[in-house]
């Protein structure tokens, strides 16, 4: 995913590794894209060796130099392959740890089970709040002009979290009926 996001950003405009890193941090790509922000420089160097990106200039900022990367024609073709692969890949993810735990919930005391599910509820609320905060920052940065496809993505992320929250509430309610 790192390669796709880095090449996608460079396809918009040439930028330094730092600029790519800041852009991905601003959009909270670690959360939704599974990108480790620290892996960006490694990916840039590797893709430079593979001919997908090239250093087009070196800028001096104070005592530091920063390389400005641009995507090559080969990189643009590779980006199209990565996009196609990403769109074809299954995106169905199940909360398998929670499902596994719930499959054997009766091995815990009702109080332990309730505490664990309440912690899950709190974690989901924290996730919702973090996504909301990231969305609001992105919305402000884009001057309230978020593209429709990005809005669709954000709406889906919120829906997934709300669905998980609803599931946990139903599991807690089911516990209440069995006590």
Image (spheres, rainbow, N blue to C red):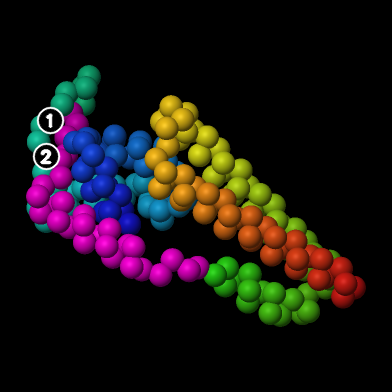
Crowding near the residue tagged with mark 1, few <14, some 14–19, many ≥20 C-alpha atoms within 10 Å: few
Q: Secondary structure at mark 2?
A: strand
Magenta-colored stretch includes residue 80: yes
**Image location of residue 26, percent across then percent down:** 42, 37
The N terminus sits in image quarter: bottom left
Which residue in the rendered view is the most extreme toward the top? 62
The C terminus sits in image quarter: bottom right
**Image location of residue 82, percent across then percent down:** 25, 60
**Residue 77 visible, this angle:** yes
**Image location of residue 125, percent across then percent down:** 66, 49
> Residue visible at 11% across and 44% down?
54
Magenta-colored stretch includes residue 125: no
Depth check, front residue: 140 or 145: 145
Residue 110's place in the image compared with 57, above or below, is below
Q: Quadrant of residue 56?
A: top left
Depth check, front residue: 60 or 158: 158
Q: Secondary structure at mark 1?
A: strand
Crowding near the residue tagged with mark 2, few <14, some 14–19, many ≥20 C-alpha atoms within 10 Å: some
Locate residue 116 relative to residue 153 in the image: left or right. Answer: right
Residue 123's place in the image compared with 65, above or below, is below
Q: How many marks?
A: 2
Q: Are marks 1 and 2 in contact (CB under 8 Å)?
A: yes
The numbered disc on residue 58 is 1
Q: Quadrant of residue 175?
A: bottom right
**Residue 112 visible, this angle:** no
Distance between mark 1 and mark 2 Cα atoms = 8 Å
> In the rendered structure, which segment of residues is drawn in magenta?
65-93
Residue labelled with disc 2: 55
């Amino acid at each position: 995913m790192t390669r796709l996001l880095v090449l996608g950003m460079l396809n918009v405009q040439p930028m330094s590794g730092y600029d790519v890193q800041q852009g991905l941090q601003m959009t909270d790509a670690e959360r939704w894209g599974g990108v480790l922000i620290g892996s960006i420089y490694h990916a840039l160097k590797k893709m430079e060796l593979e001919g997908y990106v090239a250093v087009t200039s070196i800028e001096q900022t104070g005592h530091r130099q920063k390389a400005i990367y641009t995507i090559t024609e080969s990189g643009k073709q590779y980006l199209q392959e990565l996009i196609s692969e990403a769109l074809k890949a299954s995106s169905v993810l199940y909360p398998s740890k929670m499902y596994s735990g719930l499959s054997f919930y009766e091995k815990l005391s009702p109080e332990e089970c309730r505490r664990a599910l309440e912690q899950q509820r709190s974690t989901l609320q924290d996730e919702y709040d973090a996504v909301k905060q990231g969305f609001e920052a992105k919305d402000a940065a884009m001057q309230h002009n978020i593209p429709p496809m990005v809005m669709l993505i954000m709406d889906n992320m919120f829906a997934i979290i709300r669905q998980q929250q609803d599931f946990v509430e139903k599991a807690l309610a089911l516990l209440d009926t069995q006590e």
